[in-house]
Image: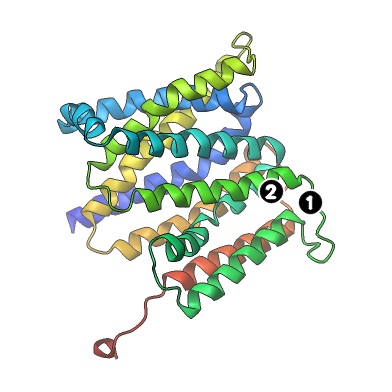
Amino acid sequence: MLNERKALFFALSAVLLWSTVATAFKLTLAEFTPAQMVFVASLVSAIALVVVCGVQGSIKQIKTTFLSNPWYYVLLGIINPFAYYLILFKAYELLPASQAQPINYSWAITLTLMAAVFLKQKIRGQDWIACLLGYFGVVVIATKGDVLGLQFDSPLGVGLALISTLLWASYWILNAKNTADPVVGVLLGFLVALPLAFGVAMYEGASWGGISAQGWLAVTYVGLFEMGITFVLWLSALKLTQNTARISNLIFASPFISLLLLAYVIGEEIHPSTLVGLVLIVIGLVIQQIKRRSPADA
């Protein structure tokens, strides 16, 4: 019972923190370019995860894990966090956060389709229903309800948000058979991303002067609570619980809390179609999680 309470506490903490990051993204993008955000947030995350590894006693695993398969970890780091967050932040720059966040949330549906292609996993009938609902929800959000007109405020922003779901799903497919310590694996990704993001920021001629204290606090918050510490909280919850499904279902509250924060903290208008589209995506995800009953369960 004590472990379950701890698991619930860690999971709720992670969900609440993830619910704040869309607001933090917008606040940070007011002063940083996407490449600058990736670099600074990755640096903050890497420092935080090194501390976590030190507490766990897994510091020595960082070097040995990387050297065991260096090109694999380089590829993972290029996909996530470098390319994934660079593209996601650009989508947030082009779109209202209330559109970018729900579209990105459809990554789990993208994962189902990609797993069928690359991992040869069977797609069930309910998975197809989930996909149809999910992507119809994306269209509703992107067109502000004008589904037949198919008019997008920013076609590039919508496209980038959808590409981010492909990258995130690709990362988890490549990571599916990785037996290394998950915290060490994520840390290596940030270490790979650091020079790449810094290089892109310098190539773009990004200015580091004139960034306010609020900007630095916002990007630090993103690094800690979107990319770093929250991941550890979520992993801890999954390790402690005996009911993974109950813990995992808490994540469905995150996008709705996020919309409330966007409306009240930065005053972003939440279009009614966004809520409709988000509900369609979440219904699709719930349907996707329903397990086929075996004869023994009947």
Quadrant of the frame with the C terminus:
bottom left
Q: Amino acid at mark 1?
A: Phe
Residue at 38% across / 62% down in the picture? 119
184 lies left or right of 157: left
Circle 2 crowding by C-alpha within 10 Å: few under 14, some 14–19, many from 20? many
Nearer the observer, 85 or 277 = 85
* Tag 2 near tag 1, CB within 8 Å: yes
User: Which x, y percent locates residue 151?
Assistant: 82, 55
Q: Is residue 52 above or below residue 182?
A: above
| Residue 293 in view of the camera | yes
Q: Residue under circle 1?
A: 152
For marks 2 and 1, the one nearer the N-term is 1
Nearer the observer, 25 or 1 = 25
Residue at 22% across / 47% down in the picture? 179
Residue at 57% across / 50% down in the picture? 104
217 lies left or right of 280: left
Would you identify the image quadrant in which residue 133 lies?
A: bottom right
122 lies left or right of 135: left
Circle 1 crowding by C-alpha within 10 Å: few under 14, some 14–19, many from 20? some
User: Which x, y percent locates residue 86?
Assistant: 56, 33
| Residue 214 in view of the camera | no
Q: Is residue 160 above or below residue 24?
A: below
User: Which x, y percent locates residue 20?
Assistant: 52, 40
Real-space Cα distance between discs 2 and 1? Answer: 8 Å
Residue at 56% across / 68% down in the picture? 131
Quadrant of the frame with the N terminus:
bottom left
Q: Residue under circle 2?
A: 158
Q: Is residue 40 above or below residue 137?
A: above
210 lies left or right of 118: right
Q: Amino acid at mark 2?
A: Val
